[in-house]
Amino acid sequence: MRTATFATALGFAVSAAVAIPRLGGVNTAGYDFMVYTDGSFDGPGTQPPLYQYGHFSPQGTNLYRLPFAWQLATPTLHYYNEVVQTALATNAYVILDVHNYARWNGEIINQGGPTIEQYASLWYQMASFYKNEPRVIYGLMNEPHDLPDNSLWPPAVQGAINAVRAAGSVSQYILMPGSSWTSAAAMPTEMGPYLLNLTDPAYPGSKERLLFDVHKYLDYDNSGTHTNYVTNNTDILQTLVTWLKANGNRQAILSETGGGRNDSSCFTMLGEELAFIKNNYPTMVGFSAWAAGAFDTTYILSLTPANYTIDAPLWDYAIRPNLPPPTYF
Ligand SMILES: *[C@@H]1O[C@H](CO)[C@@H](O)[C@H](O)[C@H]1NC(C)=O
Ligand SMILES: *[C@@H]1O[C@H](CO)[C@@H](O)[C@H](O)[C@H]1NC(C)=O
Ligand SMILES: *[C@@H]1O[C@H](CO)[C@@H](O)[C@H](O)[C@H]1NC(C)=O
Ligand SMILES: *[C@@H]1O[C@H](CO)[C@@H](O)[C@H](O)[C@H]1NC(C)=O
């Protein structure tokens, strides 16, 4: 009932007014540190350094993905909101990413672990808090994987979508995560067919604010744990783009990709991948590379500037040229 009211009162006016711009940027990790892939957490997490938003945004970065442990959101967000607000203040979009792999302390949502209601409650509270921030994007879950029954995941995503809208957050975009670590390659066949059917209670008849969330790395096993790069992924991404267009002109964001900080084998391939994303806007809304934030410069995929000022070679060669043109500073 509440959501139906939003739909008639606000839905079409908001929907007609704006389209999401091309986005490009970086994950700023930290509040996800020590979240394990079974959804357990050995906190307290680390705050991403706030100077980075002022460093990256003047280069054209207009998207930050801010991972956080679900466990940190109970009962408050600690200092997470300080980071969100610092990023938003640069005029960027900010993905709120709960980095729990569809799990809480080893148990899977709607499959023995948290109920849909418990999971949706997180998003009701987040969306109540952020409902007046139009550039917040709700990243409903990082990398669901090894789900015993894929058909039990989409109802949880629908529950979270409904909760965001019921909280009064009606204009914001929402990212729908798939299976197999939200793999871009798996999306069209595994979880995509289910996610296509999810609905937006604020916009009856329109799904334009429900975006597919995909990840893709360039190493042989798509894990992002090697610096030996084997593909620019354009075959997989082209398959995704064709599938999105064929199924109602839907849109996706590549919210994680990346390469070795200073591994020249990555420069060309990551650059080609990100150029493909750029050239396939608006089907591909954009990308956020993994990762800056609280990582130091010794982490192999680190995009954290050296001495607060000097970008990783990978950033200079492959990422910066594919950012949107700077418009704000
Ligand atoms: C999605 O909805 C369509 C149309 O109602 C239906 O034919 C299809 O089976 C649904 N897909 C899934 C995976 O449930
Ligand atoms: C990157 O690697 C090259 C070749 O190994 C090396 O000469 C250069 O100093 C490295 N740059 C940085 C910033 O680490
Ligand atoms: C990606 O790599 C393939 C194979 O090397 C190449 O044919 C293609 O042109 C590359 N894509 C882009 C966008 O450069
Ligand atoms: C960072 O600063 C230290 C200390 O001033 C200096 O030794 C080092 O060379 C600098 N690193 C880079 C990449 O400029």
Image (cartoon, grey):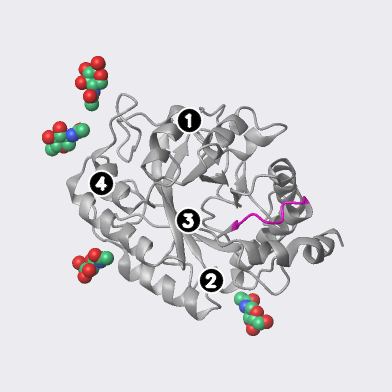
Q: Main secondary structure of the magenta part?
A: loop
Q: Which three-letter amino acid code belongs to the residue tagged 2?
A: Arg
Q: Which three-letter amino acid code belongs to the residue tagged 3?
A: Trp
> Which comes before the other along the chain, label 3 or label 4?
3
State the image coordinates of residue 213 (x, y, percent, origin top left). 51, 59
Look at the image and tell me whether residue 154 can be seen: no
Find disc 3 in the rendering and name its residue: 181
Find disc 1 in the rendering and name its residue: 48
Q: Which mark is residue 227?
A: 4
Left/right of residue 139 with respect to residue 164 in the rendered view: left
Compute the Cα span from label 1 to label 4.
Answer: 24 Å
Q: Which mark is residue 250?
A: 2
Q: Which residues are magenta?
A: 167-174
SS class, disc 2? loop
Q: Is 213 colored magenta in this rendering?
A: no
**Image vertical order of residue 320 relative to residue 300, above or below:** below
Circle 3/circle 2 CB separation < 8 Å? no
Compute the Cα span from label 3 to label 2.
Answer: 20 Å
